[in-house]
Every structure is written in C-alpha cells, then in structure tokens.
C-alpha cells in the first residue's frame, strides 16, 4: 500500500471507531469503488487518485479550515453492495459528499439513495447521458464528447461498417444504441452486435463472428478484467490491428498496461491520456507515481476522479458551506486546470477535450487525433462560448434535446429517461432468466440424485413432484420472456428508425403545433383507466364522427391512432393537429413515442413476474442438509408453491386466501413442509380437474398454526376416507400414483409433532394441518 493510502485510510479511517462526531476540525467524505470482484482492475486506482487529491488539499490547509477525512467502502462489483454501503456512508458515517462508482449499473443503484437523503455523488466515468440527477456531478464524458469524435475519425480513416461489442449491463447497451443511431445517421452500418457477461474469459466464438462479419472496426465497451482475455485471444486468432482495429470506450491505460503487446496498434477514445505532453500533466503523473510506484499509470477515469475532488473543494469554498444546496449552486461554472487541460462545470457535467490514441506495446497511447472545436465557425449572430473553452467540447446530456427552444422538451426528456430504465429492466430479466436456468439445472440435478438413490419410496415421490414443477415453471417463464422480447424489439425499432429524427422534427413544428403535440404526449404519460376492446371500438367510432365534424377527412384512421396513444376525451385540444399539413407526421411521432412508454411498462411487469418465478423456484429447490430445524414463515412457503403451480391455476382455478395480518416464523423443517403443501395443493387441483375454487386459510391459535386447504372437487367417499393416509393406498390407475403422497405428508407432520385431519363432502374437501407454534430455536431457555 502506498504512503498516501497508509496515511489516509490508516490514520484517518482507522479512527472511525472513535467519537468522530466530536472532532469539528475534520469533515467526512465517502469514497466507494470496487476493491474486489471483476471491476476491481479499474476501480482501485480511482481510490488512489481521490486519496491523492485529498492528501494535497489537506497539505494546503484543507477545505474551509477542516481536514478531509475519507471513509472508504468496497462496492465489491455488486449493485446491492453499492446501495447498502452508500446508505451506511450517508446515514451512519454522515459524510458531506461522496466520490465513486464505475459502471452505470452501480451509479443507478446509488442514485435514489443520494436523492432520498439530498446528498452529493461525484461520478468519474463516461456514461450514456440519459439522466441528470440533481444530486450527481458527472465528471466523465457525455456521448457527444466520446462517440461523435470517434465516429468522425473512424468513418474518415477506416470505413463505415462497425461491429459493436460490449459487457452485458446498462452502459454498454445504452451506449451502443446511441452509437448505432448516430452511425446510421452518418450513413454507416452495424454489421454485428454482441454482449458478454462481466468477467468473461472465453472469446473464441465472438472473434469468429467478428471475422465472419468483416467490419472496418470494432467499437468495444468491454469493461473490467475481461479485456485481458479478449485482446490476447484476438491477437492469437491472427487478426491484425491494421486489418480490423478495436476502438475502446471503457478500457484505458491501467488495463492496457497489463495486456501489453497483444493490444498494440488498436485505439481508444478518451478526454485524457497519460502521454499528453504538458508541464501540468507531467507533474501530475510524477506525483501519482511518487505516491504509488513508478510502474503505475494514469488514465482518463483516474484524472476525472482526481479533478472532481478539487471541483468539490472549489464549490465548497465558493459557497462557504458544506450544505448540499449551497454547494450545488456554487459548483456551476467552476473551472479547474486539470492535468489534461482546462475543464468547466455546466449542467452537472464538464466541458472536456477529446482525443483518439493509438496503443503502443507498453500500454501507452500515441495521440493521433484531437477533436477541433467548431465554435470559431459559428455564424456571427450565434452567441459563442467563452474563448477559453474554444478547444473543449460542450457536454450534451439528453443528446442535446434540452437545448431546444420548445415547450415539449420536458416531455421528450421524460420519454428519453425511460430508455435506460427499459434497458436496465431488459438486462435484469435476462439476468433472472440465467438464474432460472441455473435453478432449473439445480432442480434437475436434484431429480437425478433422487432417481439414483431410491432407497426409500419417499424420495421417489418427491422426485415426481419436482418433475411436475419443472415442467410447469418452464412453461410459465415463456410468457415474460415473450413480453420482454417483443418490447425490446419495439425499443430497438424506435432507436433505429425514429430516434435521430426527433430534434429536427420538434424544430419543424409551429408554436401551436408544439403545444398540441405536448398535450397529445401527456395523454399517454398520464395514467388512464384501461379500456376494454368494446370500449375502444365505441371510442374510435365516436372520435371518427367528431373529427369528420371538424371537416377533416380520414377520421377513422386518425381516431385509430388517437385511441392507441391513449386519448379518451377533449378532441378539440388537438384540432390544430388535425388541420395541419404535418398531421400524419405529428401523429406518427406521437405514436412512436408512446410505444417506448408502453414497452417500458411491459418490460417492468415481465421482469417483476420473472423475479417472482425465479425466487420461488430457488426457494423451493433449496435443501437444508444439516437435518436441523430452522425458522421459516409458513405463508411464504405456501405462496412459493402457488407461484410454481401458476400454469395449472390459470387454467380455471380461483384461489381464495384467508390470511392473518401478521404471521410469525416458526421452528420447522421448511424444505419438508414445502412437500406437504405441494402434495395437498396438487391433490386439490386433481380433485377439481383444474376447474374450481381453491381456498387457503391460515389461523393463528394459542399453541398452533392451523393451515386449511379446501377444494370444490368431487369429494372423498366415506368408505375411503379412513384409508387415505395409509402407505401404498391409491385410487388412481396402476402406474399413475405410488400411494405414498398423503402418507409422506402425515410422516412429515408427525415429525413436527403436529396433526393432520380431513373432512369431506361433495364440493368441499378440507385438509387441516396443525403445527406447533414454536418461535425460538432454543425454547428451553425461556424463563
């Protein structure tokens, strides 16, 4: 560990166990990056950069006379860890600001917590720029500061056929949609698009697909340590950089210094490279290496992490306060002489440079292109930026839509903000699908194990139940997968065909058309009651008559679009649209935008459904091999079984639940009780032939929990009723039942010192299970 890291994380962070709140000479800030996991290869150096900046500031009297005390947390390359650690930093450690994150997924996991507590995050990476939280400063690049310069250079020097390769999470998916839209706008073609899981080490199949596609270049948003395997295997496959170069958007010097020769000749696009030949940068590199070792390198994310600490310091001193709102106000227009050149804060982002660098065998870059700002060529009547920004590129969050002079901008931004959310939900669903496959594999392995160890017929009965559940769940998961696939296609179509036309379309409308268009957009952003097919037909007919009464032709066609968008009344508000020569284009654009909202909602619902199925399947498949009782909630176990039987229940079963408001967890064998509820519910469905009412009642009694499962089936004949718990007794044809199902149920209930009984008449059979109300693993210790 370096000198700086020892001093700050040792002497300062080591004091966290003491009464820090009493020390008014210090101010706490949070640092949260991944010290472990697949993202640690890039993120650990950001901590070093931030600590170096803090050490320099502390050596120069601190900020507002206070020493900065960093509290470091490990995000562990895991979204849930990021969220929980940030909440700890804000609530328990009472930091005044935080510096951290790398992936867009980590930022999105932290964002709602910073907004909830009105605290500040400084985020040092480039991102998709389809959000702008009031509680985050984005010190990395916007797409127009990285994608546009890279495309301009590649189209001029290489060609217009690109293969897009990225890690599988939010940022690469969103970035590649923007790249594809901008490439199409410039006349280029995407010849391949592929995402790989984080931490992937096998790229042979991917490289073969790149070879087959024959692109002019590969645009890579691979993140983390998977870059080491990719570039090494790319070189081993015999693809020369001169033939198909890779342009990196997420990997920088720290990664490439570990790759070395295999990456030589390829490219990257960043705002900063270590090789920038200025006195300021040479001093920065020397200080960094003096602190952390002569073999260490600097990079764009490292520089951004470093300068954002200074920008926060300047904002605090300008505000003369650590209070969030005052710092926010003071940060605007702050400038800083960064190692890579001047930067200036605007709209929570930074004016920055852009360079293309060609990789050398030592992992450093030779700068081959620097983007030239076009401010000097602007018309005389257009206000030009400050001359000191002439060499910088202005940040354009929201793809520059927020700069348009139109009342519809807020609604358009709201729609654009749905895009990364939809992408995130799509990614979540695919992740859950992989978990489902893993759970199914585990379940099938359990099946195989049970089949191989049939020393007891009890195990064979459980194997049959598991087999039934696997088939049902596999069928049930197809519904959310189909919904997400269709919705994702809609979003992709919007980006491919409509996205780049949106700014010019808005500028082409008159003021009255913009107002009417804004009102039309609000129809589908507001929540309306869903209409039945009959109600929609009646509404279309009514709309068509009203539109034709305005003297407009094609009333039926216009009415169809309005109903699809979500308009339900007040047609007079849209009369300027009907009478406009741009009416078809306006309605078409409104409809396209409405599909993004519809698709995003569909993905959210499908993802939630898949989450429930995956969780239920994993819970059911879990097996406790300790042989000891554990605390479990009976209601949760029953609901897990119901989720797994969803495909049968939907065929014609009405489920009625009578549950108490609160139900304590009891000491039991939860895996074995799952078998009880599985057998009893399955028997009820069979008795009703999947048509009827299934009633579940849970009663909290003085010494027991009573669970009753009632079906409206044919009933159990009185002469059979006394025999149903006997082993090998069955009324099913030979080969269709072992006769052990209810015997197993009784054995499990007996093992719990409980009781099971049954009462039956036609259309009403009820099994009652009584389980002891034991709430503690060690009841003998009670006084």
Image: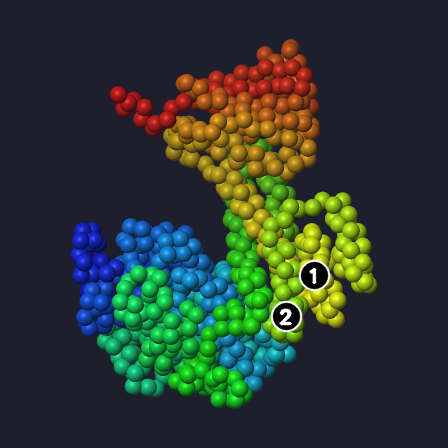
- Residue at left 20%, top 56%? 14
Q: Which residue is mark 1?
A: 574
Mark 1, secondary structure of its residue:
helix
Looking at the rendering, which quadrant does residue 633 occupy?
top left
Instruction: Locate the N terminus by quadrant.
Output: bottom left
Q: Position of residue 615 (x, y in %)?
A: 50, 42
Q: Position of residue 376 (x, y in %)?
A: 48, 89
- Would you place residue 696 above or below residue 361 in this image? above
- Viewer-proximal residue, 298 or 89? 89
Tell which of 205 and 165 is nearer to you: 165
Q: Residues within 10 Å of mark 2 (few under 14, many from 20)?
A: few
Q: Is residue 644 visible?
A: yes
Relative to 485, does residue 633 appear above or below in the rendering?
Answer: above
Q: State the residue in front, 33 or 194.
A: 33
Q: CA distance from mark 2 to mark 1?
A: 13 Å
Quarter of the picture containing the C terminus is top left
- Give the image quarter of residue 410: bottom right
The answer to the question of whether label 2 and label 1 lie on touching residues, with beta carbons closer than 8 A, is no
Residue 577: x %, y % from top left:
71, 65
Residue on which the image places disc 2: 511
- What residue sits 62% from the left and 40% below the top? 471
Q: Which mark is residue 78?
A: none
| Residue 463 seen in render | no
* Among the two numbered marks 2 and 1 on one chain, the one whose residue lies closer to the N terminus: 2
Classify 10 Å Cα crowding around label 1: few (below 14), some (14-19), many (20 and above). some
Badge 2 marks a residue whose secondary structure is: helix
Residue 480 point in image, percent of width and height: 61, 48
């Amino acid at each position: 560990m370096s000198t700086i890291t020892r001093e700050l994380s040792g002497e300062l962070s080591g004091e966290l166990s003491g009464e820090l709140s009493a020390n008014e000479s210090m101010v706490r800030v949070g640092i949260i990056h991944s010290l472990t996991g697949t993202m640690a290869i890039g993120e650990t150096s950001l901590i070093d950069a931030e600590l170096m900046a803090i050490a320099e500031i502390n050596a120069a009297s601190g900020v507002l006379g206070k020493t900065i005390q960093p509290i470091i947390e490990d995000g562990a390359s895991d979204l849930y860890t990021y969220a929980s650690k940030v909440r700890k930093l804000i609530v328990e450690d009472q930091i005044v600001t935080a510096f951290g994150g790398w992936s867009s997924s980590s930022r999105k996991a932290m964002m709602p917590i910073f907004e909830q507590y009105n605290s500040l995050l400084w985020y040092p990476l480039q991102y998709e720029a389809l959000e702008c939280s009031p509680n985050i400063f984005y010190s990395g690049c916007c797409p127009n500061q990285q994608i546009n310069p890279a495309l301009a250079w590649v189209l001029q020097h290489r060609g217009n056929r690109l293969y897009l390769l990225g890690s599988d999470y939010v940022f690469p998916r969103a970035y590649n949609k923007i790249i594809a839209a901008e490439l199409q706008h410039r006349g280029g073609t995407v010849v391949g698009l592929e995402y790989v899981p984080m931490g992937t080490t096998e790229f042979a199949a991917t490289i073969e697909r790149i070879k087959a596609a024959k692109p002019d270049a590969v645009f890579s948003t691979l993140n983390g340590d998977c870059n080491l395997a990719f570039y090494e295997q790319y070189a081993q496959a015999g693809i020369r950089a001169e033939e198909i170069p890779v342009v990196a958007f997420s990997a920088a010097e720290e990664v490439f210094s570990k790759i070395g020769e295999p990456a030589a000749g390829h490219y990257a696009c960043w705002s900063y490279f270590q090789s920038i030949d200025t006195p300021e940068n040479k001093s920065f590199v020397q200080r960094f290496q003096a602190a952390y070792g002569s073999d260490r390198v600097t990079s764009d994310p490292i520089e951004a992490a470093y300068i954002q600490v200074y920008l926060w310091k300047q904002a605090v001193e300008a505000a003369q306060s650590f209070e969030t709102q005052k710092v926010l106000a003071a940060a605007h227009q702050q400038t800083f002489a960064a190692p890579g050149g001047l930067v200036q804060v605007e709209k929570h982002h930074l004016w920055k440079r852009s360079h293309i660098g060609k990789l050398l065998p030592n992992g450093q870059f030779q700068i081959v292109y620097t983007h030239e700002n076009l401010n000097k060529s602007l018309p005389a009547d257009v206000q030009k930026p400050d001359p000191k920004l002439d060499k910088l590129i202005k940040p354009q969050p929201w793809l520059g839509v927020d700069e348009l002079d139109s009342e519809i901008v807020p609604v358009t931004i709201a729609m654009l903000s749905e895009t990364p959310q939809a992408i995130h939900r799509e990614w979540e669903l695919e992740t859950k699908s992989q978990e489902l496959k893993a759970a199914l594999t585990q379940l099938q392995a359990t099946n195989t194990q049970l089949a191989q160890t049939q020393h007891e017929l009890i195990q064979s009965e459980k194997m049959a139940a598991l087999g039934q559940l696997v088939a049902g769940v596999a069928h049930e998961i197809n519904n959310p997968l189909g919904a997400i696939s269709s919705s994702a296609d809609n979003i992709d179509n919007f980006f491919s065909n409509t996205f780049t036309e949106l700014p010019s379309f808005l500028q082409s409308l008159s003021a009255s058309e913009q107002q009417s268009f804004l009102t039309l957009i609000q129809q589908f952003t507001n929540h309306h009651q869903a209409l039945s097919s009959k109600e929609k037909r009646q509404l279309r007919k009514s709309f068509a008559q009203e539109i034709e009464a305005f003297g407009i032709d094609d009333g039926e066609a216009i009415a169809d679009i309005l109903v699809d968008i979500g308009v339900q009344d007040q047609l007079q508000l849209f009369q300027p649209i009907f009478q406009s020569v741009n009416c078809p284009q306006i309605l078409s654009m409104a409809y396209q935008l409405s599909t993004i909202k519809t698709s995003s909602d569909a993905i959210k619902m499908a993802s939630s459904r898949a989450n429930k199925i995956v969780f239920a399947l994993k819970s059911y498949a879990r097996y406790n091999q300790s042989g000891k009782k554990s605390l479990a909630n009976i209601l949760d176990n029953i609901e897990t079984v119901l989720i797994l039987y969803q495909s049968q229940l939907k065929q014609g079963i009405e489920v009625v639940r009578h549950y108490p408001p609160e139900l304590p967890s009891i000491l039991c064998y939860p895996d074995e009780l799952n078998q009880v509820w599985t057998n009893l519910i399955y028997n009820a469905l069979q008795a009703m032939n999947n048509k009827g009412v299934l009633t579940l009642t849970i009663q909290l009694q003085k010494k027991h929990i009573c669970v009753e499962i009632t079906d409206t089936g044919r009933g159990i004949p009185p002469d059979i009723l006394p025999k149903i718990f006997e082993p090998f007794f069955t009324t099913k044809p030979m080969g269709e039942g072992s006769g052990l199902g209810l015997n197993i149920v009784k054995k499990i209930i007996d093992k719990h010192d409980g009781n099971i009984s049954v009462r039956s008449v036609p259309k009403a059979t009820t099994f009652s299970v009584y389980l002891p109300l034991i709430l503690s693993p060690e009841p003998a210790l009670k006084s």
